[in-house]
Image (tube, rainbow, N blue to C red):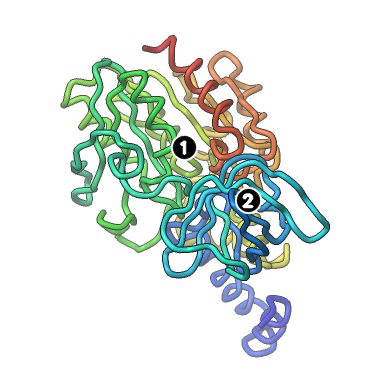
Amino acid sequence: MRWGTAAIVAAAAVGTGAAALLIGRRVSERAVRPGFAGAGAAAGPGIRVQEVAGDRVMLTRSVETVRPGRYALEWAGGGHAVVGDVLATGPQSVTRRLLATGAGSLYSGTEVRVTARVHLGDPASALGLDFTPTTVDGELGPMPAWYLPGIRGLWAVLVHGPGADRQQALPVLPLLHALRMPVLVVTHRGDEGAPASPDGLGHFGETEWRDVDAAVRLAQANGAGRIVIFGWSLGATMALHTAARSAWRDSIAGLVLDSPVLDWPATVRREAARAGVPAPLAELGALAAEGRTKVDLASFARLAAGTDLNVPALLLHSPVDAVAPFEAAERLARRRDDLVSLHAVPGGAHAALWNADPDAYGEALRRWLTPLL
């Protein structure tokens, strides 16, 4: 049933006020469940392989398939392949370089999704990097993590965003390894293998940041002198919360914020719109999400303004981010230009900025990290 039809039926059945509450709750469901924001660039059904020829693959033309950079194609049965540069475009097709084929075989007619998950597995299987599985003891219980050794006193704590998992951090691990930084890649409440949130809801980083705080404590207990927290999407928002609120914030040397959610009502509305919800109903969903999670708007406003920010931050964001408005990132960079360095990634999708230009992304990160080492 279409959203407009659903609204009319609900209003007729239970009255306008009650219908608004019911519809708002239904719309908010997408936002309040952990994993709402998607794992970077991702497309739903409708993209098909038109031809595979050597190191080239022709796909249905769409916003996702014409993006610059490096992405994965995934299909039913665990299929996975990696594509690179756009080689040619037509009215209904896009031809890209086929860089690698992993699980499964790619044939003409295969329906695929475009995702940011170029690397799959753990640091050893995906990248050949030594690591040790470990756990972070959070307030709700143990949470799985990966530890990668290094010799620096500066550690990195990496926090994935919603709709993703620790694999989101894989693309940046080779650089951090080359810089000889110890790394913790962590999980948080609601993740597979980690405790669930007590109410089963995501809280836009307002409770989840305490899981990041527990990772900071673990790093300190194992010899970290200073710590950089690197987060994607709401993982970046958790990093901001941790730097502002942690009892151990003096050990935090900096933040890397990839596509941070700074204007959460706008993000909730955008997510609803991506699901086909009309604007008035999306607004009801944002209000319902606020009520259900009891999110602190004043706290979010302080984060967005950088009021409590006291460490350097590299802010990576895309002007065409369809989830987290770029304007909020620009405002933060202007207000705190003493600490915040904004690196815009043209054409990048939300939390998939490395994919858009791996070399430039890595160089921006290396240049920013080097003075802190």
The residue lying at 50 percent from left, 32 percent from top is 257
Is 303 placed left or right of 146 in the picture? right
Q: Residue shown at 42%/34% (left/top)?
A: 239
Q: Which percent across, then down, holds residue 138? A: 22, 44
Amino acid found under the numbered disc labelled 2? Arg
Relative vertical location of residue 316 with respect to residue 64 in this rendering, above or below: above
> Residue 258 shows which numbered tag?
none
The residue most toward the right is 91
Residue indicated by mark 1: 236
Residue at 29% across, 34% down: 129
Q: Determine whether label 1 and label 2 are within 8 Å by CB.
A: no
Please state which of residues 254 and 334 is positioned toward the viewer in this rendering: 254
Q: Is residue 188 above or below residue 200?
A: above
Q: Reading the chain from its start, which is encountered first: label 1 or label 2?
A: 2
What amino acid type should be assigned to the residue bearing mark 1? Ala
Near mark 1 (Cα within 10 A), the count class, few <14, some 14-19 or many ≥20, is: many
Structural crowding at the residue carrying mark 2, measured as other residues with C-alpha within 10 Å and reported as few (<14), some (14–19) or many (≥20) = some
- Disc 1 element: helix
Q: Is residue 166 left or right of residue 225?
A: right
* In the displayed structure image, the side of residue 344 where residue 179 appears, left or right: left
Helix, strand or loop at label 2? It is strand
Question: What is the C-alpha distance between the residues marked 1 and 2?
Answer: 36 Å
Classify residue 371 by image quadrant.
top left
Q: Which residue is mark 2?
A: 56
Of residue 18 and residue 201, the one placed in the foreground of this image is 201
